[in-house]
Image: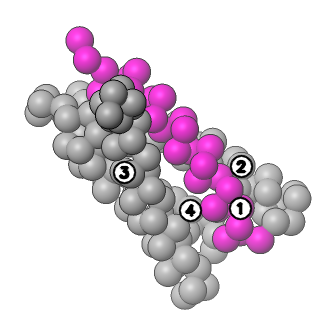
Amino acid sequence: MNLVRKYDEIIRYIIAGILTTIVSIASYNLLRNINIDYKICTILSWILAVIFAYFINKLFVFKSQKNNIKEFINFILARLLSLFIEFIFMMIMVDFININDRIAKLIVQFVVLVLNYVFSKFFVFKKI
């Protein structure tokens, strides 16, 4: 029980991360199924996932009581950095290594999940 309490935030983040990943991958696949270019799908699925992630991280993971625009802007800035990294990884895997874009998207999500936790914990929802 002490382990659960000790790692409570990480456990909640993993749950939130899984749900956010589902939003990202589901929206990406829906858009790909209507033949939208994978680069556009990456950006659109990112937007949907970030909106979902902000609220689930704020309320469920980090339980932030702040109600200000600075927190939201910091969240968006941190996620823009992870979008940039995701976009570069996607282009490398799809255009240069020739990995199927849907498989590449799944692989990249694990990297993004870790980066987003670090950014959120130490930059966005840091406790003062």
- Nearest the viewer among 2 and 36 is 2
- Nearest the viewer among 58 and 31 is 58
Mark 1–mark 3 Cα distance, whole angstroms, equals: 21 Å
> What secondary structure is marked by label 1?
helix
Amino acid at circle 3: Ala
Amino acid at circle 1: Ala
Residue 38 in the magenta stretch? The answer is no
User: Farthest residue toward the top?
Assistant: 128
Is 12 situated left or right of 63 in this image?
right
Q: Which mark is residue 42?
A: 4
Chain-order first, disc 1 or disc 2: 2
Q: Are marks 3 and 4 in contact (CB under 8 Å)?
A: no
> What secondary structure is marked by label 3?
helix
Q: In which quadrant of the rendered view does residue 29 lie?
A: bottom right
Residue 103 in the magenta stretch? The answer is yes
Quarter of the figure that contains the N terminus:
top left
Number of numbered callouts drawn:
4
- Magenta segment: 100-128
Amino acid at circle 4: Thr
In the rendered image, is residue 100 in sight?
Answer: yes
Q: Are marks 1 and 2 in contact (CB under 8 Å)?
A: yes
Counting from the top left corner in percent of width and height, residue 5 is at: 30, 30
Q: Which mark is residue 16?
A: 3
Q: Are marks 4 and 2 in contact (CB under 8 Å)?
A: no
Q: In which quadrant of the rendered view does residue 96 lie?
A: bottom right
Q: Which mark is residue 104?
A: 1
* Residue at mark 2: 89
Counting from the top left corner in percent of width and height, residue 55 is at: 24, 48
